[in-house]
Image: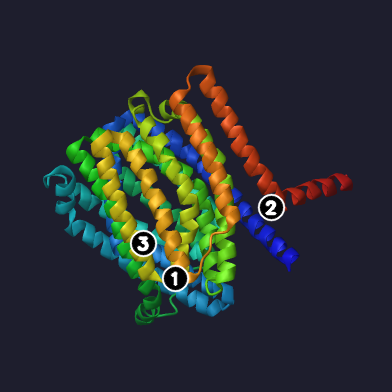
Amino acid sequence: MHKNEERKSKSTYDHVIKYTSLFGGVQGLGLLASVVRNKLVAEILGPAGLGLISLYNAAATLVSNSTNFGISFSAVRHVSELYEQGDTDALQRFIQVVRTWSMGVALLGMLVCGIFSPLLSISYFDDTSHWYSFVWLSPVVGLMALTGGELAILKGTRCLRRVALQSLINSLGALVISVPLFYFWGEKAIIASLVSVALCTFVTTFYFSTRSYPISFQCGIKYSFVEGKKMISLGVSFILAGILGSGVEFLIRAYMVQTGSEADVGMYSAGYLLTVTYASIIFTAMETDFFPRLSAVNNDIQQANQVINSQIEASVLLVSPLLVALWVVFPILLPLFYNEEFMPVIGMAQCAIFGLYMRSVALPISYLSLAKGRSRVYLFTEAVYDVVAVSLIVCGYSMDGLRGVGVALSLAAAFDLLLVWTTAHRLYGFSLQGKAIKMLLLQLLFGFLTFGVTVYAEGAAYWLLGTLCFLASGTISVRILLRETTLLHSLVQKVKNRLGRK
């Protein structure tokens, strides 16, 4: 029994590492394109221009999450279950249901964005002078809904290589589309750029999705409405959680632009991008494969525990050395990615990194409620976290500017971990294994040491000690991964077999 569990654990690790490598590698290339794009846009528009882009993006995301009924997420669970059952006809019918609902919520989102455009303008700029910009933003909202439905189909049917490829193409497309627009027309091209990038994203996602599952009109609108209610029941709570989450970002940016400036919003967005967004590539890579797998075993708490704990362990081991490296090279990355005007962001970014350790544990646990269809529980935890997060960030910004925001982001992440851990344990019997806790604490130790180096060390000592921390964290992660997986042994065996043939 012990050997069977060990083999099963290694198999799970292998699966996680395999698909994390796939998505991480592809998204790494996408990240490179994003870095080049942000660098050029920062040089062209400056902090204030980036702040405007961030404001419009936040508004589009808020309206989208308020109207899309969570289809981009809830559909994955239902599609995944039908895919696992092997019922091709039922799967094809439900895919048509997803597409019908996606089209409906896309139209709803565009309508809502147009109607509330004056209110959005007042929220950001204290007047209605920018209402027409938010009207032109409505196609972005509609395209986001359509893209979310097609992406859910790809994820639920395990077309993960196509998901990775479309992500890379979209990153390159955003670079090719947006930079020329900003170069020739500056801030006037912001809305046009957002619409063009959203259209590019939809077209590529739709292309890959329809290659696997072509458009079909076997079912009527009435059938799609009735069958989609199961998906929407989960989505209603998800939409409310999405409103709260997007509302938090909306409120934070609105508060900063009201009490500070558009440049502060641009600084905040740059710091958030460098830490939470860029460092979350590994989380995104794992989520794409993780949620369908967890949904398939959600009724067996022992299997669910195994899947979640393996995901946590792999997350901590993979992300920790990267976080240490990020701490050390921030003084190089910031002017490289942006320019010297953004140097005040360093304090915020370095303080915010601690939250990513917490997120590597909290994120897999938080998906358990969704996998079980307990949407109200998910909504409750998201609502409590959002209230705490916005309160901490507003207080942090008021007390210590951007650095206070960084501290608040880490404190909010720690609270989120405690909240989802307690909820999952009490409601579902989830238990966080000792091995996962030890890995987190050990890697956190190197995190605190690295933070101390960035604060107190200078010159050659800074780089020497920072490098040692990275090597120590990386060595531990690599040794554990080699022990827990069979991928390296398989790779070595393949090389030997090929050499033997020659």
| Snapshot quadrant of residue 202 | bottom left
Q: Is residue 79 left or right of residue 261?
A: right
Q: Mark 1 points at which residue?
A: 427
Spot occupied by residue 160 in the image (x, y as percentages of width and height): 56, 58
Q: What residue type is labelled 1?
A: Leu
Q: Identify which residue is drawn at 22% across, 45% down.
A: 254
The mark lying in front, picked from 2 and 1, is 1
Q: Mark 3 points at which residue?
A: 381
Q: Distance between the residues labelled 1 and 3?
A: 13 Å
Q: In this view, does 451 lie above or below 298?
A: above
The label shown at residue 285 is none
Q: How many labels does the image show?
A: 3
Can residue 485 be seen here? The reply is: yes
Q: Which amino acid does label 3 sit on?
A: Thr
Q: Which color mode does the image show?
A: rainbow
The label shown at residue 484 is 2
Mark 2 lies on a secondary structure that is: helix
292 or 371, which lies in front? 371
Q: What residue type is labelled 2?
A: Glu
Quadrant of the rendering where the N terminus is positioned? bottom right
Q: Which of marks 2 and 1 is nearer the N terminus?
A: 1
Spot occupied by residue 10 in the image (x, y as percentages of width and height): 69, 58
- How crowded pointer 3 is (Cα within 10 Å; few <14, some 14-19, many 20+) is rated as some
| Snapshot quadrant of residue 85 | bottom right
Spot occupied by residue 119 in the image (x, y as percentages of width and height): 15, 53
